[in-house]
Image: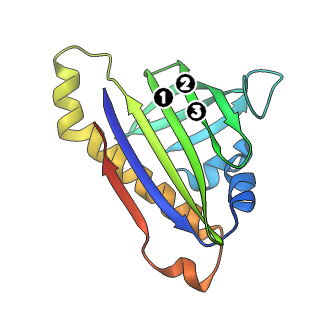
């Protein structure tokens, strides 16, 4: 399983950043490579909410559905794939003084034996890192501030 982690410090209170980032209707505005979000359950926010959407990676579109787990207001949640490529995401929001550190963690496994590992190392992982970093920068721009103009996006590889 591949794990990719990226973080950004946003110069805005965690409540404001969380309210914006937790609104599924705004995800296509800042998260790269995704579109056509729609809820697939009566629950549209919090635990049990499910969203179907289109994801595009290296030019290939895919239908995906994710269910929200472990939702804690102003702290984060976990998204677990129910359709499409097996994956899990964590959205973590932390207060840092007057700022918010947002960390996005993606764990996935390509369901293609042998070739999947090669594709991942040559193309997929690099593309996901690019998408995550660009998405974090996009989110940061939604909170205009002189202090948000600095470069504070980081990307880490986990175990």
Gap in Å between the C-alphas at discs 1 and 3? Answer: 7 Å
In this view, the residue farthest toward the front is 97
Residue 116 vertical placement versus 136 (above, below): above
Q: Nearer the viewer, residue 69 or 132?
A: 69
The image quadrant where one finds the C terminus is: top left
Q: Residue at x 39, y 46 (%)?
A: 5
Q: Which quarter of the picture shows residue 43?
A: top right
Q: Residue at x 43, y 50 (%)?
A: 132
Q: Earlier in the sequence, mark 1 or mark 2?
A: 2
Q: Are marks 1 and 3 in contact (CB under 8 Å)?
A: yes
The residue carrying mark 3 is 78
Task: Answer with left or right where residue 141 lies relative to residue 84.
Answer: right
In the picture, the disc for residue 88 is: 1
Q: Are marks 2 and 3 in contact (CB under 8 Å)?
A: yes
Dot 2, how many residues are within 10 Å of its Cα: few (below 14), some (14-19), or many (20+)?
some
Q: Position of residue 139 (x, y in %)?
A: 58, 61
Q: Are marks 1 and 2 in contact (CB under 8 Å)?
A: yes
The residue carrying mark 2 is 80
Gap in Å between the C-alphas at discs 1 and 2? Answer: 5 Å
Gap in Å between the C-alphas at discs 2 and 3? Answer: 7 Å
């Amino acid at each position: 399983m591949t794990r990719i982690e990226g973080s950004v410090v946003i110069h805005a209170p965690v409540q404001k950043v969380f309210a914006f980032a937790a609104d599924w209707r705004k995800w296509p505005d800042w998260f790269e490579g995704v579109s056509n979000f729609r809820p697939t359950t009566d629950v549209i926010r919090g635990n049990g909410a499910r969203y179907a959407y289109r994801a595009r990676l290296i030019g290939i579109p895919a239908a995906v559905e994710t269910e929200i787990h472990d939702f804690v207001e102003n702290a984060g949640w976990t998204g677990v794939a129910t359709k499409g490529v097996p994956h899990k995401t964590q959205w973590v929001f932390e207060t840092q003084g007057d700022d918010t550190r947002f960390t996005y963690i993606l764990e996935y496994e390509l369901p293609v034996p042998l070739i999947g590992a090669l594709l991942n190392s040559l193309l997929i992982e690099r593309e996901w890192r690019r998408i995550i970093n660009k998405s974090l920068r996009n989110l940061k721009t939604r909170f205009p501030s002189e202090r948000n103009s600095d470069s504070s996006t980081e990307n880490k590889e986990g175990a």
